[in-house]
Amino acid sequence: VQLQASGGGLVQAGGSLRLSCAASRAITSINTMAWYRQAPGKERELVAGITSRGYANYADSVKGRFSISREIMKNEVYLQMNRLKPEDTAVYYCKADEGVFGFWGQGTQVTVSS
């Protein structure tokens, strides 16, 4: 599966951004679609994921601020990010997790200024 992420940008603290990830095939056939992020000098970390059945999970650091959703007919997954903080600055990646195999999209930069 191929993934195309978009929607990053520069935003002030407290602002919002919406990331999109377009998959090349039906997302309902993929175990989990997820968003990860990697800040400079840090390891890549899971931000949020949504299973093929629609169950979502979030990193503690983003609970209550970020929301993952999907549009099945478009094979797209979204990450709505509200009340952004400077520590949310990172390259955000979309991932399709199919158990043994994982497929990554290209990253999209999110920069939150203080």
Image (spheres, rainbow, N blue to C red):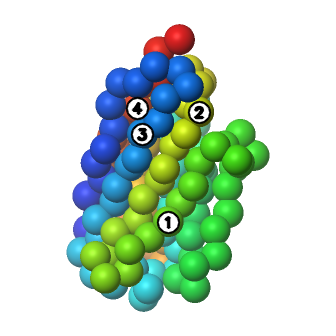
Direction right: furthest residue: 60
Q: What residue type is labelled 1?
A: Ser
- Rounded to the nearest angstrom, the CA distance separating label 3 from label 1 is 14 Å
Q: Which of marks 2 and 4 is nearer the N terminus?
A: 2
Of the numbered discs 3 and 2, the one sitting upstream in the chain is 3
Quadrant housing residue 22: bottom left
Q: Please name which of the two marks, 4 or 1, marks the residue nearer to the observer.
A: 1
**Tags 1 and 2 touching, CB below 8 Å:** no
Q: How far apart are marks 3 and 2 (CA)?
A: 9 Å
Which residue carries the number 2 mark? 83
What residue is disc 3 on? 17
Marks 1/2: CA–CA distance:
17 Å
Q: In this view, does 59 lie above or below 76?
A: above
How far apart are labels 2 and 4 at the CA level?
Answer: 13 Å
Using a 10 Å C-alpha cutoff, classify the residue at mark 1 as few (fewer than 14 neighbours), some (14 to 19) or many (20 or more): some
Vertical relation: 110 (above or below) 1: above
Residue, x 47% and y 53% (percent of image)?
79
Q: Which amino acid does label 3 sit on?
A: Leu
How far apart are labels 3 and 4 at the CA level?
8 Å
Mark 4, secondary structure of its residue: strand
Mark 3 in CB contact with mark 4 (< 8 angstroms): yes
Within 10 angstroms of label 3, few (less than 14), some, or many (20 or more) residues? some
Q: Mark 1 points at which residue?
A: 69
Q: Which of marks 3 and 1 is nearer the N terminus?
A: 3
The residue nearer to you, when weighing 91 against 22, is 22
